[in-house]
Amino acid sequence: MMVDLALGCATLGAAIEQVVNFFRIIGDDLQIYCEQRDDEFWLGVRLAQPELDPQGFLPDFWLLYLQRFFSWATDLLLPVKVVVCSATGKCNQNQRLVAFIREDWVASETNDALLISRKYWTLPIVRTRSEWLENVDRLVFQGIITWPDGNEQYANQVRALLLKALHLRTPPPRLQEIAQVLCLTVQTLHRHLQHEGTGYQRLLDELRRDFAIDLLVRQHQSIAQVAQQLGFAEPRSFSRAFKQWTGQSPSDVRRS
């Protein structure tokens, strides 16, 4: 449910706030918090009874999980300025899970947190629930999971603008409009997308497919409702497009 809430947000900041609220609701044993400070923010973990976890495993696990999850959701490996950890002296520096974030983590008496620049607060969420399930399947069955690198890609920026339109249920921006927003010519943007192994129509179809599956299977909406939300003039047109995207009809997917 936490992942569903986060992936339903438009930006990283909104997703973090949803995760913080989620943990606030489900219990008091473990809390996720976010503290804003000028041009930075702390994303941290608090245990109600830290003495029950003397090795500091739970805070380490959740800091690493959240940093990796939010990186995947934004398709950008989030740079972390500082990592602070409590429960120090219980193991070697590189044996802590947070060493996967930064090897030079800093010892603290009580805090377990990541310091991140606020410039990433408005990063768009560019992943969908369907992509998350595929990611989990790869991890479970193949032991493989792919994390983004530190480079922003043009495909991500196009996905973000298309995804925003789908969330708002407005017509998706055309390639020309996206190129204007990114201060590029259409030809240059097209070339960048080709270099990244994708294209405008492919990105739009993938996002519409994932949205359609989510609406049909998870939200149990009718075919007519889904067609309307995705901007199709009639259910028949949507059904044809859906079969091209998935190889199955919407009715078959709902029954499976």
Image (cartoon, grey):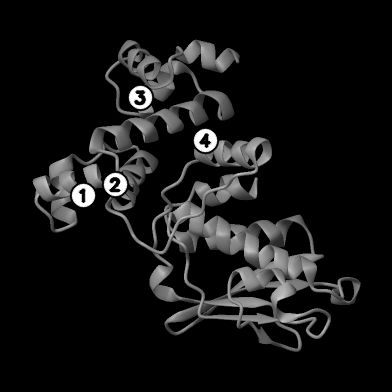
- Specify the quadrant that holds the C terminus: top right
Q: Secondary structure at mark 2?
A: loop
Dot 2 amino acid type: Glu
- Above or below residue 60? Residue 145 is above
Expressed as whole percent of the image width and height from the top left, the position of residue 117 reads 44, 77
Label 4 SS: helix
Mark 1 nearby-residue class (10 Å; few <14, some 14–19, many ≥20)? some
Q: CA distance from mark 3 to mark 2?
A: 31 Å
What residue is shown with label 2?
A: 196
**Residue that label 1 marks:** 192
Q: Quadrant of residue 54?
A: bottom right
Q: Residue furthest right?
A: 52
Instruction: Name the front one of labels 3 and 2.
Output: 2
Mark 4 or mark 1, which is nearer the start of the sequence? 4
Decide: is 248 above or below 15: above
User: Image quadrant for the N terminus?
Assistant: top right
